Image: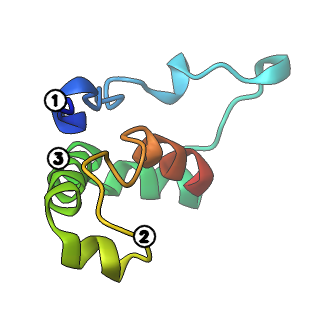
């Protein structure tokens, strides 16, 4: 039986991290009013991660969804790496 990717990897909230705890080159002080800092504080990352894991499981079990996302055929493996959400977050800033 294929292991459930939703159980294997779990998102760990980084909310306790503050700008003071964020390493920057040359000890640059980041602006609390920066739009990316504000956006990060507005996005419910843990909730998005939980929904993402549910979506992964739904796609893994549903041939129609696998067809819809463009897979060549049905497979039991996860269609996406569970770490994709983390990579998307990094790309968003």
Quadrant assignment, res 8:
top left
- The residue labelled by disc 2 is 71
Residue at position x 65%, y 19% from top?
23
Residue closer to the observer: 74 or 27: 74
How many numbered marks appear?
Answer: 3
| In this view, the mark in front (1 or 2) | 2
Residue 76 x/y as whole percent? 24, 49
Residue at position x 18%, y 50% from top?
47
* Mark 3 nearby-residue class (10 Å; few <14, some 14–19, many ≥20): some
Residue 64 x/y as whole percent? 21, 79
* Mark 2 nearby-residue class (10 Å; few <14, some 14–19, many ≥20): few
Does residue 74 appear to the left or right of 89 in the view shown?
A: left
Quadrant assignment, res 38:
bottom left
Q: Which mark is residue 38?
A: none
Residue 9 x/y as whole percent? 28, 27
Quadrant assignment, res 92:
bottom right
Tell me the distance, in whole angstroms, between the alpha carbons under discs 1 and 2. 23 Å
- The residue labelled by disc 1 is 7
Q: Residue furthest right?
A: 26
- Residue 10 in sight from this viewpoint: yes
Mark toward the start of the polypeptide (1 vs 2)? 1
Q: Secondary structure at mark 3?
A: helix
Q: Is residue 90 above or below residue 19?
A: below
Residue closer to the observer: 85 or 74: 74
Tell me the distance, in whole angstroms, between the alpha carbons under discs 2 and 3. 23 Å
- Residue 33 in sight from this viewpoint: no
Does residue 22 appear to the left or right of 53 in the view shown?
A: right
Mark toward the start of the polypeptide (3 vs 1)? 1
Q: Which mark is residue 50?
A: 3
Residue 26 x/y as whole percent? 85, 19
């Amino acid at each position: 039986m294929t292991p459930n990717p939703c159980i294997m990897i779990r998102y760990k909230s980084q909310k306790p991290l503050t700008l003071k705890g964020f390493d920057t080159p040359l000890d640059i002080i980041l602006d609390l009013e920066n739009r990316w800092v504000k956006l990060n504080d507005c996005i419910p990352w843990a909730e998005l991660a939980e929904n993402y894991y549910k979506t992964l499981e739904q796609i893994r079990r549903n041939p129609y969804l696998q067809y819809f996302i463009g897979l060549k055929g049905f497979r039991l493996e996860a269609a996406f790496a569970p770490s994709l959400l983390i990579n998307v977050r990094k790309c968003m800033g």
